[in-house]
Image: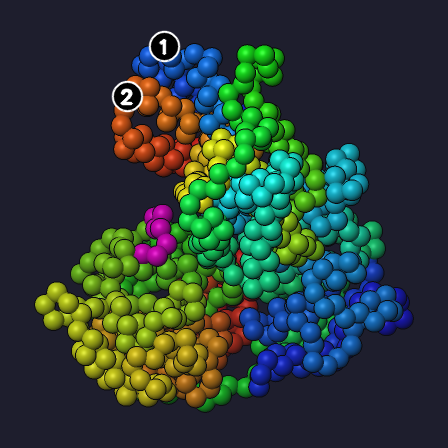
Amino acid sequence: MNNDRLREWLNRLSPVFVLLVVYLLFVLVAPASFSSVRNLELIIRQTTIVGITGLGMTMVIIGGGIDLAVGSVVALVTVVIAWLLAHGTTPLAAAAGGLLAGLICGLLNGVLITRLKLVPFIVTLGTLLVFRGLAKGLAHEQKIDAPLSWLNELSAAIKPDHAWTLVPPGVWIFAVLAFLVALVLRYTRFGLHTLAIGSNEQAARLCGVPIEKTKLVVYALSGLFAGIAGLMQFSRLTVGDPTVAAGLELDAIAAVVIGGGSLAGGEGSVLGTIVGALIMTVIRSGCTQIGLSNWLQEMITGVIIISAVVLDRLRHRQRT
Amino acid sequence: MTEAVRLQVEGVTVRFGGTIALDGVHLSVAPGEVLALVGENGAGKSTLMKVLSGAILPDAGTMTLDGQPYGPRDPREARNHGIAMIYQELSLAPSLTVRDNIMLGVEPARMGVLDDRQMNEQAGKALAELGHAIPLDAPVKWLSVSDQQLVEIARASAVGCRVLILDEPTSSITQTDVQRLFQLIRRMKAAGQSIIYISHFIEEVREIADRFVVLRDGQSVGAGNVADHSTAQIVALMVGRELQDLHPRSARSPGEPILEVTGLSSLPRVNSATLALKSGEVVGIFGLVGSGRSDLVRAIFGLAPVQSGKVRVGIYEGAGTPARRWSQGIGIVSEDRKSEGLALSRSIAENLILPYPQSVESGALLSPSRMKQAARGWIDRLSVRCRSADQKIAELSGGNQQKIALARLLHRDVDVLLLDEPTRGIDVGCKRQIFELIDSLATQNKAVLMISSYLPDLLGICDRIAVMNRGRLSPPRPVSELDEHAIMLAAVGSGTGDRP
């Protein structure tokens, strides 16, 4: 049993090893600028958006579902925030409005999935288009300019006089959220129910787990997290852009899967997802600095995703 | 009965459409008693389980639990009343820990935050009461099947179970684990719990149960103390029915062996099976659910891996894939028509030619008109009731679906037909037609290997019958030397001593 437990821990940490290996590889081959502290900070900042989206996606996937709409939600939220700012609301109210929009999108997904008994893939594929279209309509198919405010500092590089914060507030928000989600999954009834539904929905129903309610909350949270990611995206862009974050959902799913999540449900972890997101950013950053073209970066990322799943399966075969 | 009654079931009746699944069933179980519920496959045991667990509402009848009216509307309500069910298929969440599985649905929590200490305590206590140590924080998927079963029982007792219902609990565990389970049942019995033990293994029933109730064709046809009845008497109650004349039998003249199976083993359930099937004969395999009968034909057909042993088909030797078996002249009708046998959302014609698309190709392309023509031919010959050859399989009745599944084999013109429960769930008219078809195939020198759990069908249509019991296949014997009691004894017996 002790052996099993040790192996389980190694399994759980194996994405971390992969991250270290990938990072060290680039330290060796890339120019010195890659291993600078500045670049490290940049990598972490660039991971924030996909990372926060990935937190929601982790819960969804652990619960046996999928949420394809998060990229469109991010775009919609940037538009909502910019529109509100441009119409004279305070930055705080604009941010709250953006998060509310994200939450409503998530709730809508949850309601459609639980009430109409449709599969999450179809529902969120549909709302992916609906939300994207809504964002474009709201913005009249162009970027919405907004006055600069403190919102833009959330994910901007930190100024020298704030060096003591190490990273910008957005990254801290990400860290706190990650910690919270990990706690919720491990220590709350809701977390246990989500895991149980993803692992065996029939068994969960038999035990009296409120399936519909749990799913509704999961998708609502996924929308809310996409909303927070949208806030970060706006902070970086300083405008509302209805075409931004196309394909973000796939990056978020990839992060979960690289981190050991199973699309069949019941498996996945917050740590894994963060590491998965970091692995993808490191590859992108490293390839850019070596001077590899975009197409090569994409292919390498694709290979990493497939290898991660193959590795995962090999590890599980060893167990049994 | 003068003593207290824990659960009483009176006159429970369940109808599905026109058929009566349960017809005025009576039973009662006292605290500290083990009641065995026995009956053949399809006798209504699982329907009764579903009524007790709230999955089906009965059309008539009453139930009382400790004197209070009991009528659960869903599994959750049954669980809250202390009726716990351990199904053949375990229902645990594999990636959750032992502790979380035991406490699922009844977690102690404050404001939604789990109380870890209480969870450990309660789950640990439930396991300790069963007298077994399983690490609470191990994911359930790491455990053996029998340990998983234990976790399910612990889950039942964690909510204060009053009646524990076990459905064929020994079908997938080893002999030593069976003894462990029996000790556990005895301990729960001593603690005053009521246990309903469903099984078709009479030997087990004799060992563990105090009383028994026999279900047959949806009715409770007998009950008594286990000690006062012999195994043969209980089996007689299980079987006792009249033969119906559904089974034509022409004069057959079996030829050379065309399918020979020697010492075939296939995990998990087939253990060294040997059988020779001659052209022009129908051989039956009888066995209860879980005996390994389907696994045997699946291994022959290459649908399950062969561990050891040989299969010879005509001039071909060795293991085969399903594709190779088709080309060697073997075809199969699956026991599970809906999920494996047919593509329900596709048309009759498409399903029909699936194993033999070559027959309707012109050049490299499928010819829709020849597909339809082929389908129409078989629709006429087997009098399949349908609108057209383009109609979806899902829209046909069970019997007509099964005719298409069989027509597939005829269209490919195979020499050996492996039929797994070919008449399950179809009406009497279609049944009769299918038996006529099987009989006429035998006279055309085809070889038929047929599995059925309905003995009169096997006795009516087969030339020889072999019995499968816990993975072991008895040598086939001519039907003239067999009767229902002997076959049933061999199928429910525990050892090698009482083969037919």
Q: Is residue B53 left or right of residue A240?
A: right
Counting from the top left corner in percent of width and height, residue A218 is at 60, 47
Q: Quadrant of residue A195?
A: top right
Toward the viewer: B231 or A227?
A227
Can residue A265 be seen from the camera position used here?
no
Residue A66: within the magenta? Answer: no
Check disc 1 and report its element: helix, strand or loop.
helix
Q: What residue sits right under mark 1 in the picture?
A: A32
Horizontal side of residue B230 vs A19, given as left or right: right
Q: Is residue B52 above or below residue A314?
A: below
Point out the stretch of residues depicted in magenta.
B302-308
Give SS at disc 2: loop
Indicate the quadrant where residue B36 lies: bottom right
Q: In this rendered view, identify the residue nearer to me: B471 or A202.
A: A202
Question: Chain for mark 1?
Answer: A
Q: Which residue is painted at 18% across and 70% down in the image?
A: B366
Residue B304 on the magenta span: yes
> In this rendering, does residue A106 appear at all?
yes
Q: Are marks 2 and 1 on the same chain?
A: yes
Q: Which secondary structure class fits the magenta region best? A: loop
Q: Amino acid at mark 2?
A: Gly
The residue that disc 2 covers is A291
Q: Is residue A90 left or right of residue B471?
A: right
> Which residue shows up at 80% across the image and 41% down it?
B110
N-terminal label among 2 and 1: 1
